[in-house]
Amino acid sequence: MRHWSMSMSQSLKRDELDEILSVAEAAAEAAGRVTLPYFRAGVEIRDKSGAGQDFDPVTAADVAAEEAIRKVIEAARPEDAIVGEEFPEKAGESGLTWVLDPIDGTRAFMMGLPLWGTLIALSDATGPIVGIIDQPYLRERFVGSPLGAWQGKTPLRARACADLSEARLSTTGISWFSEAEQEAFRAVEAKAQLTRFGYDCYAYALVAHGFIDLVIEAGMQPYDVHALVPVVQAAGGVITDWRGGPAHASSQIIAAGDKRLHAQALELIAPFAN
């Protein structure tokens, strides 16, 4: 059963939250209909990075998916602002902002790996309220809100893990880390039971699902982060920046399924926080 928790948001009444969840899921459906025909279909890749910068791929699927998401949101809730990766910000009047990443994990997408996802969040001035991590190829949608966290009809609950020595650690990759950030990650990795790389947003879904215990990232953008926060938190996990502050306002992110584990890892990486 989904339980209403006012501690996660004081700004929305139940009926509006239900409406927002309905819009968010409809937007995820629309994105999936657009992205799936491109997946494993030899889609053309464009590098949107500047000269001398790291490879930053974008595909027609990224652009079309964000267009589809925006169309759903603008039709249902025209008063809300929208921030996305591929298009300019749309101003709003409601005090609520949708934060979108149409394909988080474009590198995985272009390599045929089903570890990418569509990220859709609804945030107010205090931070994210509703988040969706949608993986349409696997038909998995992870939803987090003040009502709880679920995947399909299954409630999500993060795994209890009291000590780093028992922790399953993940990061997408450390090529986005500075030398100091790499040192911080290695300090945690040296104490963890197991480390796996390359999962993008899917790692956070698996924290909520109780299969990964700890994710540490750097070089994140707001559209990479907002949707992750409600999913992890509503499943009983903790997600912050490397100082223990709000995750959505930082490029350095740590997510853990257990607050005891979060505290241990945070102690190791906090000296390297920006």
Image: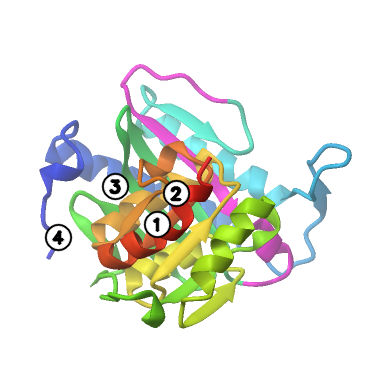
Q: Which residue, given by chain and number where applicable, does mark 4 sit on? A: 2
Q: Residue furthest right?
A: 51
Q: Which residue is mark 3?
A: 21
Q: Are marks 1 and 2 in contact (CB under 8 Å)?
A: yes
Residue 100 magenta: yes
Mark 1 highlights which residue?
266
Magenta segment boundaries in residue numbering: 89-113
For label 4, the SS is loop
- What x and y, as percent, mark residue 78? 39, 25
Q: Are marks 2 and 4 in contact (CB under 8 Å)?
A: no
Cβ atoms at labels 1 and 4 below 8 Å apart: no
Residue that numbered label 2 is attached to: 242
Residue at 48 percent across and 40 percent down: it is: 250
> Marks 3 and 1, Cα distance to the nearest angstrom?
32 Å
Mark closer to the chain start, 1 or 4: 4
- Distance from disc 2 to disc 4, alpha carbons, whole Å, reads 30 Å
Query: From mark 1 to mark 4, how far is it between C-alphas?
Result: 30 Å
The amino acid sitting under disc 1 is Leu
Q: Where is residue 173 shown, x and y percent of the image? A: 64, 63
Q: Residue at x 48, y 72 (%)?
A: 169
Earlier in the chain: of badge 2 and badge 4, it is 4
Kind of residue at disc 2? Trp
Q: Helix or strand or loop: what does disc 1 sit on?
A: helix
Element type where label 2 sits in the image: loop
Residue shown at 60% from the left, 38% from the top:
85
Q: How many marks?
A: 4
